[in-house]
Amino acid sequence: MGIPSVSKSKTTRYLLLAACLVLLVPDLARAQTALLNVSYDPTRELYRDINTRFAALWHAQGHEAVTIKTSNGGSGAQARAVIDGLQADVVTLGLGGDIDAIAKHGLLSPDWQTRLPYNATPYTSTIVFLVRKGNPKGLHDWADLVKPGVSVVTPNPKTSGGARWNYLAAWIWALHQPGGNEATAQAFLTKLYGHVPVLDSGARGATNTFVQRGIGDVLLAWEDEALLASKDLGAGRFDVVYPSISVTAEPPVAVVDSVAAKHGTQKLAEAYLRFLFTREGQEFGAKHYFRPQDKAVAAKYAANFPTLRTYDIATLGGWKVVQPKHFGDGGLFDHIYQPGK
């Protein structure tokens, strides 16, 4: 049997179809452009909204369509995943020390913190107490957490950035008590962790332990996570308590240059992070209970963020000092937390 003949009209249609497919190939490739944001635990709701808005703006400005995905987990564990090969175009982690660790492996520039405003920190937060409605155990300050019968929920500082801020907030409070020094601070932290029944790997896991599983009398939490739990996740079931002293928690952001260069997403990644510092990006942060850096936005949402006495990481020497001293292998936390003893 011979090959069936094809009419000229059909041939013309086939050629036109093939030409259209060739013309569509670049658009199909652009439609597949993706950006991966590797983030820390309490940012799920924040970046869900930011990703949707930024993708729409980016496309409306004449750029290719983009899909933005966010991976969440404990900040330290997320940094380790990126170091081990997770292909993050950008990282938005719980503390600068975790991004420094990624930079040490040559995945991004050591000067990453100078490339964006406010030391590359679009929003700040602090550490507060989330207690059950009515505060039945009367927990008002750090000293109350070590009273007999009080159960404290906090994640593991080895894997969670929020947990390291929790630890440091307690440490700073202890240092600023009458006669306070590093020995008394270590003694207080040892006593505090003796009241911790379980260490979850990340802040959201700890929130779920406290909110959903009903474990513990108090959750040490990012302010944004505590406000989310009290207003949205468990409305009417919890109260937020502000201690007398806490820490200025600074979760920074950075482009992972080596990955962005490989993916061809450097321009996109930089624009995505710059959006966080715009007026609209700051509004997103404030609506999700992060303290905005923009003064006008901060003033607009001031009623949501009580003033309290805080100290930043620089007062302790910065992350290059704090990380190995407190959280490195054999550091103070390893001596403080020894379950079973």
Image (cartoon, helix red, strand yellow):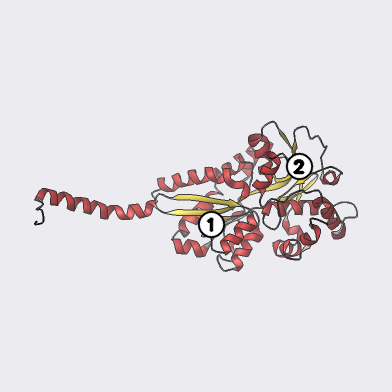
- Can residue 16 be seen by looking at this rendering? yes
Q: Residue furthest top?
A: 236
| Contact (Cβ within 8 Å) of mark 2 with mark 1 | no
Given residues 89 and 331, the one toward you in this image is 331
Q: Would you call the spot at circle 2 few (<14 residues within 10 Å), some (14-19), or many (20 or more)?
A: many
Q: Position of residue 13 (x, y in %)?
A: 16, 49
- Can residue 113 be seen by looking at this rendering? no
Image height of 161 relative to 324, above or below: above
Q: Quadrant of the C terminus?
A: bottom right
169 lies left or right of 48: right
Q: Residue furthest right?
A: 179
296 lies left or right of 309: left
Nearer to us: label 2 or label 1: 2
Measured in 3D between alpha carbons, the distance from the residue under mark 2 to the one under mark 1, in whole angstroms, is 35 Å
Q: Quadrant of the N terminus?
A: bottom left
Q: Which mark is residue 216?
A: 2
Kindly indicate the quadrant of the structure image that contains residue 224.
top right
Q: Which mark is residue 90?
A: 1
Question: Residue at coordinates 67% horizontally, 54% vertically from top-left?
Answer: 161
Given residues 73 and 249, the one toward you in this image is 73
Given residues 313 and 150, the one toward you in this image is 150
Dot 1 amino acid type: Val
Q: Position of residue 52 (x, y in %)?
A: 48, 44
Q: Position of residue 194 (x, y in %)?
A: 82, 51
Question: Residue at coordinates 45% horizontally, 58% vertically from top-left?
Answer: 265
Provide the secondary structure element on which disc 2 rests.
loop
Provide the secondary structure element on which disc 1 rests.
strand
Dot 2 amino acid type: Gly
Q: Position of residue 205 (x, y in %)?
A: 66, 47
Given residues 44 and 339, the one toward you in this image is 339
Chain-order first, disc 2 or disc 1? 1
